[in-house]
Amino acid sequence: MKTLIEKLVREAIETAGLPADAVPESIGVERTRDPRHGDFACNIAMVMAKAARTNPRELATRIVESLPESEAIARAEIAGPGFINFHLATDARFAGVRRILEEGDTYGRSDAGENRRVLVEFISANPTGPLHVGHGRHAAYGACVANLLEATGHRVYREYYVNDAGRQMDILTVSLWLRYLEQAGEQLSFPRNGYRGDYIHDIAGALARDHGNAFVRPAAEVFEDIPPDGEDDAKERHIDALIARCKTLLGDQDYRVVADTALHWVLDDIRDDLEEFGVKLDNWFSERSLVEAGLTEKVLESLRANGDLYEENGATWFRSSAYGDEKDRVLIRENGQATYITPDIAYHWDKFRRGHGLLLDVLGSDHHGYVARVRAGLTALDQPADALEVRLVQFVTLYRGGEKAQMSTRSGQFITLRELRAEVGNDAARLFYVMRGNDQHLNFDLDLAKSRTEENPVYYIQYAHARVCSVFRTLEERGYSWDRDDGIANLGQLDDSHETSLIAELDRYPDMVSLAATNRAPHTLVHFLRSLANEFHTYYNASRFIIDDDAGLRNARLALITATRQTIRNGLALLGVAAPERM
């Protein structure tokens, strides 16, 4: 209906002969807060008045007088300084309810995205351990944004970038090997910079079961002449020397076996965790594959051929400052190892190569400088750098009993996503993670997430859905059935304030889905669903639905609450939250 009114206003402006350059790109049509002021209001006359050199009320009068006839509009009135208030015809007021009943699970979806290909890369946590509660927010946010884009007509591809070729994987491999040596009876001092979680012991046990003592080397030989461990740079030199020693003592083939054991164990755990969390991924893209397929080298060759690389102090530098970055960046270190920027540029170049028109990355809040660096690389490679969009996700803090919960310890233990899900459930975790904007810090109240009160948004919304289901169970117990066609035919009887408010709220849903998708803001949908649930609960507490002596009104009210149930279910599905029939 909002779209129809915008179209009518545009036609009226043209008919009235108003200057085209005074017409804004967007016609501001919104639902009225007070039904006495009609169903929709438009402020176009006040927006155009200055450019049209006309008094707003006079301009509004000209627009109203030029409005085309429409069966949907009962009348249009001018109010205040120049608002145009639209009163819908009786039949049009209930068009949204009929639409919901007709479209069902597809209500709220659109083709606005015109099938544009979008690659959403999210989570992409280093495969060095289980997912923790911070990764969970990335997972929930990325999955919801992907769902919203899909619901608005985009062709969405969901991807996890596996950092399986960098230094952190070497540290994980050494950590596993040293724990394996300990289990074989070797006495050693575990490095400060190693991965210290209990899961490393579990992987070491699996390595021993599969390969026996094949990789055991004397601890004295491992640590001979290794720089001492310590703080800051000392611990870095210590771990790097251990990595080099591990590669020397094991050789390329055995080192790869140990590394792959760690990688596969962790990745399998992450896959299982995300699958249980309801997060779908279309592809797990290996960083190692970039090197093995020669893509990283191809990117370096292209940059070198374009004159965008230069050598300084033994390192290879990229002239990224020439493409909008704040300074040039090292791509190849003095030791011949690539920095993380090199494969990242190659990875995004490959995303375009695979045919995706929009690259949407969901990254941690510490990646502020990331965008300019990668965009510089893409620009130098003649790719549409402005098609790279990055959304940063802020940190999560857990609270229990009003107190900040301990997230991790020096021993390497931390609260995992799996532990959080076990405590509060998938539904609460999915919704709580996205009920605030991604750019805002999230305080996750564990007690609230588990509560069965109206303060808990997931419970409050789900309870509205379950209540509708309960009404229909009672209907059946009392020997009635819902006559859908009769309900639609009698929608005109729904004229009390609760029904009017609920219908208006239901009509907002498609706009809320569009807004949430456009702004990459799932929390917009959460707030809408909570508002819709509130409208329903208020209606439920004030009205009877199973009316014995008026079948028409009974069927109409059942049609309205069925539309409400459908809309709640559709919205929860986009958030990855279940819509239970009983609670």
Image (tube, rainbow, N blue to C red):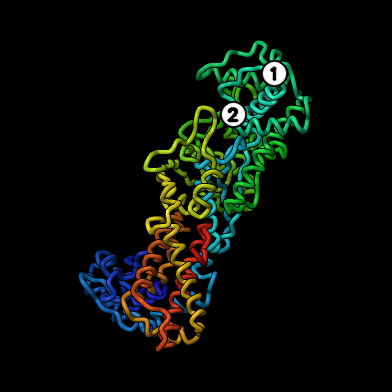
Query: Horizontal placement of 250 versus 569: left or right?
Result: right
Residue 384 pos. (x, y %): 55, 48
For the N terminus, which image quadrant?
bottom left
How far apart in space, not on screen, are marks 2 and 1 (Cα)?
18 Å
Query: Horizontal placement of 267 versus 436: left or right?
Result: right
Q: Which residue is mark 2?
A: 195
**Residue 507 quadrant:** bottom left
In the displayed structure, 476 sits above or below 162; it is below
Q: Amino acid at mark 1?
A: Glu
Residue 192 pos. (x, y %): 56, 22
In the displayed structure, 99 sits above or below 444; it is below
**For mark 2, does the 10 Å Cα neighbourhood hold few (<14), some (14 to 19), or many (20 or more) residues?**
many
Residue 12 pos. (x, y %): 34, 77
Whether residue 377 is visible, yes or no, is yes
Tell me how many marks there are.
Answer: 2
Badge 2 marks a residue whose secondary structure is loop
In the displayed structure, 127 sits above or below 82; it is above
Whether residue 439 is visible, yes or no, is no
Lower sequence index among marks 2 and 1: 1
Query: Which disc number belongs to residue 250?
Result: none
Badge 1 marks a residue whose secondary structure is loop
Residue at the location (44% across, 62% down)? Answer: 461
**For mark 1, does the 10 Å Cα neighbourhood hold few (<14), some (14 to 19), or many (20 or more) residues?**
some
Q: Which residue is mark 1?
A: 186
Q: Nearer the viewer, residue 463 or 120?
A: 463
